[in-house]
Amino acid sequence: MSKNTPFAITLDVGSSLANRTGSWRTVKPTYVSRLPPCNAKCPAGEKCQAWLFLAEQGDYEAAWKQITEDNPFPATMGRVCYHTCETACNRGTLDESVGINSVERFLGDNALAKGWAFTASKRESGKKVLVVGAGPAGLSAAYHLRRMGHAVHVLEAAEQPGGMMRYGIPKYRLPREVLDQEIARIEAMGVVIECGREVTDLEAEMKAGNYDAVFLGLGAHLARRTYIPAGDASRVMDAVSVLKGIEGQDAPMLGRRVVVYGGGNTAMDVARTVRRMGAEPLVVYRRTRDKAPAHQAEITEAIEEGVTMKWLSTVKEASEGVIKIEKMVLDADGKPQPTGEFETIEADSLVLALGQQTDLGLLNRIPELSVANDEVAVDAAMMTGKKGVFAGGDMVPGDKNVTVAIGHGKKAARAIDAYLAGCEYVEPKQPPLATYERLHTWYYADAPKTIRPMLDLVRRQTTFDEVQHGLTEENALFEARRCMSCGNCFECDNCYGVCPDNAVIKLGAGMKFKFNYEYCKGCGICANECPCGAIDMVSEDI
């Protein structure tokens, strides 16, 4: 045996491996793969931990391909997703959550810069699917269906594809060139997108095109209204129309003093948008800031940019140049109640941001569809009451955001693929959750979260330049390496190094390990020294 060989690999087989010490164990170790909380919380169903593992090795293309197994919009989602994965991240209990969304944006931007393309299925199924709506749900469904080998025809009423990603999210959050490139990549697979083509009669469209199945991905483009007495000369508009108008050639004339009524993300988007147009926006909301449905980061950024907030207030009346406001108070249940105290505010226009709903007029001639509260009922496979007609996104019950819509599109595509094959898609059973309590965090080095830099405040107030910058490659690598690989072996070799009986067998890079139970005594040292909780001690009888 060479004196230069590392001690860890020079253990003589004449030791414990040759002299079996007998088995008196009652429990034995076994490797497990648990569900990381980030994966569990992603509405699009991304395998966050898997692509972070690839990214931290510098294999960016493989990481991007892993993301796009579930989500065709990583550069877009790296900008607009509210990253519920990070709120679930176990690292947040230790110090700060991993910047999963930041790394996703880096990978998405890297893919666009290098021209990475999607690959369509090599087989053609001979089946034809109609997708109504080129928003996140519709485009996600189209992408996945095309990968499965189906011909996909997307019809979109607007002049450009993207749905609420284009017409509901301002440019300072999502540059249009990013969105356009990611949509073009889907078209390059062979997905046909026809814009300026509104579907008014779904039954007639299905028969004319001889489609085998349909996916409905209609966005919530209609503004919810409320009755506010207004004079003939007062300017009252809805938030959706304002955002769409700004996206088009003719921006709406709102004046200098703009009151935005509402407390959601759309209200913040409108207020921040008109601020960039030189107006002085005032947001009026009937509850307190902590009760506002908008994300707190959106509210903070709006205030930084000069948007004024008026909490516990409601709009009672609008007349030329003046808005009448009533002061509210919260009762014991947290519900706003009127006080009878009023004030007037000078305003050139009032923008209502009270939520959106979907125009379901094209479904009127299909009695099998169940519609309630402006939403279409679907089953677990996203199929409506009409056989072969599926739906997702804003038009079905559930949360209304881009990530959820993308997840709906993927789920529906899998169900449609199975339907076209004459069977049903069965979701694979998920393994148990990888909880923080299973981790041995003393193995992980301190590593503060990398914060994405922001555009300077002057340009945020005066231009539509992108507000939030991306990470550098160095920072993205660092952030990916903060992942603790919860519940899944990342080949740290701890179990291999600490086993007193050499009962852990290393299978080679990427192949992990196995136990040799002929020599394992069930001492549990391996499980106690596994950083990510990927070893269970189970009964000897199992």
Image (cartoon, grey):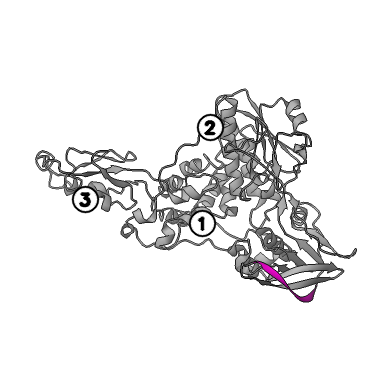
- Alpha carbon of mark 1 to alpha carbon of mark 3: how far? 37 Å
Judged left or right of residue 97, residue 387 is right
- Whole-number angstrom distance, CA of label 2 to CA of label 3: 44 Å
Q: Residues within 10 Å of mark 1 (few under 14, many from 20)?
A: many
Image point (33%, 47%), residue name: 534
Name the quarter where the C terminus is drawn. top left
Amino acid on which disc 1 is placed: Leu
Dot 3 surroundings within 10 Å: few (below 14), some, or many (20 or more)? some
- At mark 2, the secondary structure is loop
Residue ID at (55%, 49%) = 109
Q: Amino acid at mark 2?
A: Tyr
**Rendered view: 311 above or below 78:** below
Horizontal placement of 349 versus 408: left or right? right
Residue range corresponding to the magenta coloring: 335-345
Does 39 lie within the magenta span?
no
**Residue that numbered label 2 is attached to:** 425
Which residue occupies the foreground of this view, 277 or 380?
380
Q: Which quarter shows the N terminus?
A: top left
Mark 1 or mark 3, earlier in chain: 1
Decide which of tag 2 and tag 3 comes sooner along the chain.
2
Q: Residues within 10 Å of mark 2 (few under 14, many from 20)?
A: some
What's the magenta bit mostly, secondary-structure-wise? strand
Mark in the foreground, 1 or 3: 3
Q: Is residue 218 visible?
A: no
- The image position of residue 63, as x and y in percent, is 47, 44
The reply to whether residue 532 is in sight is yes
Disc 3 on helix, strand or loop? helix
At x 69% / y 67%, what residue is drawn? 286
Q: Residue furthest top?
A: 126
Quarter of the view holding residue 458: bottom right
Q: Which residue is disc 3 drawn over?
A: 498
